[in-house]
Image: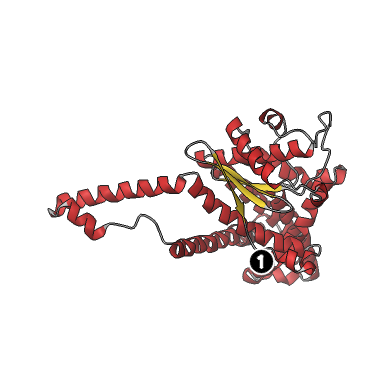
């Protein structure tokens, strides 16, 4: 990987990553590594271990099915590394210190009101400094369940409800009831709901991107992409070389989300054409879309692999929407962030180049 005169991408790598709190998680063909900038400004690296049933059961590596399994693994590893990065970066300790400070202030106010000494109240009511591992796991599990529930509500239920409201208002502008129930409006339902999902997705990203912590996370996201591009071009992994790369990569998770929505539109349209009455009951229609998510995920995974493997008109069209949204989800990183991304990348590059293939 030393071709300095390479123009464009010289090799296609299977290495991918994820931005975490003050760091990068890189997943290579042999191992996965987490690199995080610690409070003392050094870079801590840890290997991330997780079960991978695809390696044990080869049949799980079949097209589409492997996408479903890989997505589930990615969600698990992503949550695991995010929690660990909070510890390594000092965020967990900072939050605990702030919580402790608030608790002390509360006790002092209570002491003033009750006349009981602060020391006695502290002995009686002092909170443990850390949650137990079991309790932390429970909290994170509940958070994940609530997150999935919110996603279902925003991307599955809300678009269906909005479409139903539109249908109810359509008669007021001269659209016949038969056209609403059985005609062209129902045939266009999956497409219109898909547009609403995209609008909700982009709107949500734009909203959260305004917070300082998310802006910083998006800078690490940019550092991850730039580092992967530098490696793919065969350039030495230096801050200067990485800084010159673009931050929009076709194998990004943002592009994957758009592909899932697009695949969902296509399959949902076919279902509506074959079974027109299925959309009349919102609950059933939402349930069908939820059950089909694994299929959308698997097909989206195969498409994202094609976009990473080939560079032609078709793959450029497929990747274009996701690349555009990456203008929101990635930001230009500073040199310190690039150093972290380089460290994560160096840890996962395999000795055997044959292992690093899409």
Tell me, what colour scheme is on the image? secondary structure
Q: In which quarter of the image is residue 342?
A: top right
Please name whichever residue, 211 or 44, is drawn nearer the observer in this view of the structure: 44
* Residue visible at 80% across and 34% down in the picture: 2
Question: Residue 127's spot in the image, x, y percent?
Answer: 31, 57
* Residue visible at 70% across and 36% down in the picture: 226
- Is residue 10 in view from this perspective? yes
Q: In which quarter of the image is residue 193?
A: bottom right
Image quadrant occupied by the N terminus: top right
Vertical arrangement, residue 326 with respect to residue 62, above or below: above
Classify residue 187 as left or right of residue 217: right
Classify residue 247 as left or right of residue 96: right
Classify residue 24 as left or right of residue 259: left
Identify the residue at the far front of this view. Answer: 351
* Callout 1: SS: helix
* Residue visible at 40% across and 59% down in the picture: 131
Mark 1 highlights which residue? 290
* Residue visible at 81% across and 50% down in the picture: 357
Q: Quadrant of residue 168?
A: bottom right
Q: How crowded is mark 1: few (under 14 residues within 10 Å), some or many (20 or more)?
A: some
Total numbered circles = 1
Please name whichever residue, 303 or 205, is drawn nearer the observer in this view of the structure: 303
Vertical arrangement, residue 184 with respect to residue 96, above or below: below
- Is residue 183 in view from this perspective? no
Question: Residue 351's spot in the image, x, y percent?
Answer: 77, 47
Question: Residue 218's spot in the image, x, y percent?
Answer: 60, 40
Classify residue 88 as left or right of residue 313: left
Question: Residue 180's spot in the image, x, y percent?
Answer: 71, 63
């Amino acid at each position: 990987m030393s071709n300095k005169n390479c123009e464009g991408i010289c090799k296609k790598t299977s290495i991918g990553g994820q931005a975490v709190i003050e760091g990068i998680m890189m997943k290579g063909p042999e191992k996965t590594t987490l690199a995080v900038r610690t409070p003392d400004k050094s870079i801590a690296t840890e290997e991330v271990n997780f079960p991978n049933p695809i390696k044990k059961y080869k049949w799980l590596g079949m097209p589409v099915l492997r996408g479903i399994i890989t997505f589930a693994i990615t969600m698990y590893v992503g949550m695991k590394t995010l929690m660990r990065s909070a510890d390594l970066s000092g965020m967990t300790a900072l939050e605990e210190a702030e919580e402790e400070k608030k608790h002390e202030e509360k006790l002092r106010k209570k002491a003033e009101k009750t006349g009981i000494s602060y020391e006695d109240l502290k002995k009686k009511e002092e909170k443990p400094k850390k949650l137990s591992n079991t309790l932390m796991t429970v909290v994170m599990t509940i958070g994940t369940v609530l997150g999935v529930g919110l996603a279902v509500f925003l991307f599955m239920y809300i678009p269906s409800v909005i479409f139903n409201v539109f249908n109810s208002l359509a008669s007021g502008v001269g659209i016949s009831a038969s056209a609403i129930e059985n005609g062209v409006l129902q045939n266009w339902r999956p497409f219109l709901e898909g547009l609403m999902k995209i609008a909700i997705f982009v709107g949500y990203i734009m909203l959260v991107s305004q917070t300082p912590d998310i802006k910083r996370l998006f800078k690490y996201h940019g550092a991850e992409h730039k580092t992967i591009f530098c490696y793919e071009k065969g350039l030495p992994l230096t801050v200067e070389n990485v800084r010159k790369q673009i931050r929009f990569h076709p194998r990004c998770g943002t592009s994957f989300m758009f592909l899932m929505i697009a695949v969902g539109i296509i399959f949902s349209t076919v279902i509506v054409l074959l079974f027109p009455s299925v959309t009349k009951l919102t609950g059933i229609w939402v349930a069908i879309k939820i059950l089909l998510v694994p299929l959308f995920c698997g097909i989206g995974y195969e498409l994202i692999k094609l976009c990473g493997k080939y560079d032609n008109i078709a793959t450029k069209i497929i990747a274009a929407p996701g690349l555009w949204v990456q203008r929101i989800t990635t930001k230009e990183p500073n040199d310190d962030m690039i150093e972290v991304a380089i460290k994560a990348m160096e840890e996962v590059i395999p000795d055997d180049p044959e292992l690093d293939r899409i």
